[in-house]
């Protein structure tokens, strides 16, 4: 029986006949069986839906929740009663209205959705990331959306954590690379501008900072040294304006995440967002600043601050080393110039000692002048006869250029020499001298002349001429005068003999003074040795008496303290006896050097620890090594004496709380040891006598000492074929630099 027939029977006004009724009852039983089967099927689906271990939700097309399983409730943090009948958009479970409308449109076209990643919040606000699938479900003519969710929160969090870790690791690697580059430049170069350029450009290139600059303090003004990325710079900045000046004044790094919030910010270019200013230090003084700025939406943070501060510390150390190196380089340059001058003057004096004609004498003088003076074009020597002068010999001019005599009154510089007895110098003469018209001197732009003296009178002038301006300077006056003096000596033999006799008497007097000073120092040495022994022996005796008389009453800590004092004083006595024995042995029979492979880096660390233990908390010894001296062929005992004496002196002559900088680097086959203190320093006039036996500087006051240590240091260094240098400023500190060959001896 069809549905249409059944509807017709049910709509009849009269009851059906028996046959029709029988067919009606059979049809109803069939429909009842089908309905019961459908209910059983949906009950089974419902049971599977709620038992499913994956979160699922059933909604109508409008987004109203029809049913939801326990796993989905657990994921969302809501109860089932709180969710049934609710609009998913009202709960803000996984989407915005715009997102859901877009997803629904795709769903209606395709009939399903797959692998849609959504982010939502639990009831407690916790973030959830899920992969969502939609399937179409039709029941009793109605359409539903079966939503299946796969929780990937932990996976996405792990991925995010890995990305963050990778970014951190990448940045740390970049930071390490840049810091290593700074350390490498620092260890290989003392040129401060080179290091500054490398740091500034390295910061910009490796980290993408677009605006980087470095300023140093000069005459209470911040002066730009190098920059990267600026079209227009701020130029010189006074120390009372701007963020960089504030960092220098406060001696503390500053981070401005938003420069617009600080009224002191000075703008060089438009669009700056953030700024970091890290001060640079020499000792405790702020001497400059490393500055980084960002533009646009890029905001600098704590990680950027840490990097810039780390770099500023390296630059600070570089400035200190560069200043020391510059001072040492200037000293070496002056020493080299003085040595060259002394050698040239000695050779001239030796050559002029004999009887030489005037022409060879001038050739000798000119050859040595070319060694020590700037490049010049001509040389003239004129002699004075009454009121007139005559060019006796010349070099660099055509023959016969200066014939005859001329009145001295025409040449102002010679007139001044006759009265003032001093060098004349013309650094630049843009127009020819009046008295030079018509002579080869018309093309001279710079000249220098020194009077030739004999018996207190000016008998001539030694001139050097140059066609270039500013060839000669004030510093060349003494050099030329020395040669002029030698010329005068050669011309007047009697004056030479007289000077030699005077020099001999002076040397004899100096030798007698030296002998007397040595005798006095030996007597002082006996007193100093007595004092040096008495003080530690008294300390040991006192500590021993306390331990003997009051041992049971002393605490363990007090006993350790007394024993530590005894050990310290014994070490002091041992070092002192070693110095005395070593010096005596060197004077009597000499010392045989015993080279062997030694880890010099570790030896320096051990001695640093030993001297630091003796110094206690009153001083800090900072050791820095490049780790390249682990196989040094040296006499370990002698090197130990060198380091102990230098470090002990650095501690002894430094104020309490002072720092001693101990640096070990390798240059080719040499070890370079630098020990720097900020103590009392050495008077300049006493530096040359510093390594003499028993000598002690006049400013040591009551500080005990024997005057042996530096003598032993110099002997030990020279036995290794090395060299030792000292630079010092009284009241500021001293630096000893030792260069030791450490290569293995030839087989």
Image (cartoon, helix red, strand yellow):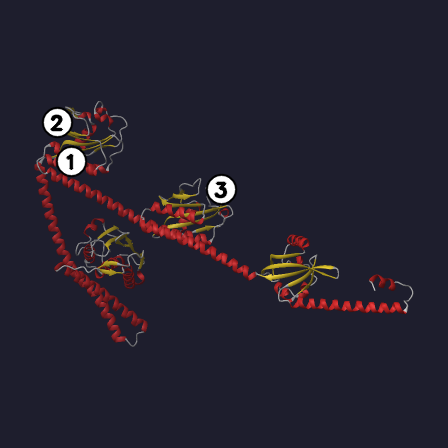
Q: For residue 386, which numbered disc appears in the image?
A: 2
Quadrant occupied by the N terminus: bottom right
Comparing labels 2 and 1, the label whose residue is closer to the camera: 1
State the separation of the CA atoms marked 3 and 1.
Answer: 64 Å
**Residue 184 is at least partly visible in this image:** yes
Compared with residue 579, is residue 684 higher up or lower down, i.e. above or below?
above
Rounded to the nearest angstrom, the CA distance separating label 3 from label 2 is 76 Å
The quadrant in which the C terminus is found is bottom left
Q: What residue is pinned by disc 1?
A: 365
Q: Nearer the viewer, residue 10 or 210?
A: 10
Which mark's residue is nearer the viewer, 3 or 1?
1
Place of residue 33 in the rendered image (x, y in percent of width and height, measured from the top left): 78, 69
- Seen in the picture, residue 192 relative to 426 is either above or below; the reply is below
Q: Seen in the image, is 205 located left or right of residue 440?
A: right
Relative placement, left or right, of 692 versus 89 is left
Q: Position of residue 52 (x, y in %)?
A: 64, 67
Task: Single out the residue that lies furthest toward the bottom.
Answer: 552
The circle on residue 270 is 3
**In this orientation, which residue lies closer to the viewer: 28 or 238?**
28
Disc 2 secondary structure class: loop
| Mark 3 residue element | loop
Secondary structure under the numbered disc 1 in the rendered image: helix
Q: Are marks 2 and 1 in contact (CB under 8 Å)?
A: no
Tag in front: 3 or 2: 3
Q: Which residue is most to the top?
A: 438
Which label was assigned to residue 664?
none
- For label 1, the crowd category at 10 Å Cα-Cα, with few meaning under 14, some 14 to 19 and many 20 or more, is many
496 in relation to 534, above or below: above
Q: Position of residue 415 (x, y in %)?
A: 18, 29
Viewer-nearest residue: 644 or 692: 644
């Amino acid at each position: 029986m069809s549905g249409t027939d059944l509807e017709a029977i049910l709509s009849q006004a009269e009851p059906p006949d028996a046959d029709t009724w029988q067919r009606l009852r059979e049809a109803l039983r069939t429909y009842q069986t089908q309905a019961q089967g459908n209910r059983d099927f949906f009950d089974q689906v419902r049971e599977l839906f709620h038992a499913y271990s994956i979160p699922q939700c059933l909604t109508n097309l409008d987004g109203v929740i029809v049913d939801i399983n326990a796993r989905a409730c657990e994921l969302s943090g809501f109860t089932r009663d709180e969710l049934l009948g609710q609009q998913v958009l009202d709960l803000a479970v996984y989407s915005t209205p715009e997102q859901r409308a877009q997803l629904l449109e795709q769903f209606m076209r395709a009939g399903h959705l797959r692998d849609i990643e959504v982010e939502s919040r639990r009831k407690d606000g916790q973030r959830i990331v899920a992969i969502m699938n939609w399937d179409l479900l039709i029941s009793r003519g109605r359409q539903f959306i079966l939503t299946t969710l796969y929780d990937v929160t932990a996976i996405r969090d792990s991925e995010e954590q890995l990305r963050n870790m990778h970014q951190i690791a990448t940045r740390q690697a970049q930071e390490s690379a840049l810091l290593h580059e700074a350390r490498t430049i620092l260890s290989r170069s003392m040129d401060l501008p080179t290091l500054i350029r490398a740091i500034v450009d390295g910061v910009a290139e490796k980290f993408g900072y677009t605006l980087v600059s470095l300023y140093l303090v000069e005459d209470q003004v911040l002066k730009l040294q190098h920059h990267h990325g600026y079209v227009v710079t701020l130029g010189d900045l006074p120390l009372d304006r701007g963020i960089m000046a504030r960092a220098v004044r406060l001696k503390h790094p500053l981070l401005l995440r938003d420069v617009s919030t600080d009224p002191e910010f000075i703008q060089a270019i438009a669009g700056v967002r953030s700024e970091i200013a890290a001060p640079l230090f020499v000792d405790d003084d702020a001497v400059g600043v490393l500055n980084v700025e960002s533009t646009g939406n890029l905001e600098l943070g704590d990680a950027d601050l840490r990097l810039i501060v780390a770099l500023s510390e390296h630059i600070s150390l570089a400035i200190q080393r560069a200043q020391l190196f510059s001072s040492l380089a200037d000293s070496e340059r002056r020493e080299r110039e003085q040595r060259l001058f002394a050698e040239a003057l000695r050779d001239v004096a030796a050559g002029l000692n004999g009887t030489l004609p005037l022409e060879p004498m001038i050739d000798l003088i000119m050859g040595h002048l070319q060694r020590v003076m700037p490049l010049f074009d001509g040389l003239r020597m004129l002699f004075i006869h009454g009121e007139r002068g005559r060019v006796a010999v010349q070099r660099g001019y055509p023959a016969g250029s200066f014939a005859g005599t001329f009145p001295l009154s025409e040449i102002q510089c010679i007139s001044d020499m006759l009265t003032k007895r001093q060098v004349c110098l013309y650094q630049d003469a843009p127009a020819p001298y009046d008295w030079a018209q018509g002579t080869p001197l018309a093309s001279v732009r710079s000249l220098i002349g020194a009077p030739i003296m004999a018996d207190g009178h000016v008998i001539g002038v030694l001139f050097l001429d140059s066609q270039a301006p500013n060839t000669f300077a004030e510093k060349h006056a003494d050099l030329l005068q020395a040669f002029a003096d030698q010329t005068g000596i050669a011309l007047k033999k009697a004056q030479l003999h007289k000077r030699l006799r005077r020099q001999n008497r002076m040397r004899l007097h100096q030798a007698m003074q030296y002998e007397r000073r040595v005798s006095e120092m030996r007597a002082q040495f006996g007193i100093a040795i007595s004092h040096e022994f008495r003080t530690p022996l008294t300390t040991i005796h006192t500590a021993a008496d306390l331990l003997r008389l009051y041992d049971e009453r002393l605490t363990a800590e007090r006993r350790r303290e007394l024993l530590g004092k005894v050990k310290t004083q014994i070490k002091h006595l041992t070092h002192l006896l070693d110095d005395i024995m070593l010096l005596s042995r060197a004077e009597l029979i000499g010392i045989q050097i015993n080279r062997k492979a030694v880890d010099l880096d570790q030896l320096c660390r051990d001695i640093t620890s030993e001297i630091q233990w003796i110094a206690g908390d009153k001083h800090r010894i900072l050791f820095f090594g490049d780790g390249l001296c682990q196989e040094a062929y040296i006499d370990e005992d002698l090197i130990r004496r060198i380091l102990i004496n230098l470090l002990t002196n650095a501690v002894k002559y430094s104020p309490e709380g002072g720092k001693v900088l101990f640096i070990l680097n390798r240059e080719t086959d040499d070890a370079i040891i630098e020990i720097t203190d900020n103590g009392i320093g050495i008077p300049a006039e006493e530096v040359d006598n510093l390594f003499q036996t028993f000598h002690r500087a006049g400013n040591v006051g009551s500080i005990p000492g024997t005057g042996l240590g530096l003598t032993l240091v110099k002997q030990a260094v020279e036995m290794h074929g090395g060299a030792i240098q000292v630079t010092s400023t009284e009241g500021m500190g001293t630096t000893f630099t030792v260069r030791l060959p450490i290569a293995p001896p030839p087989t």
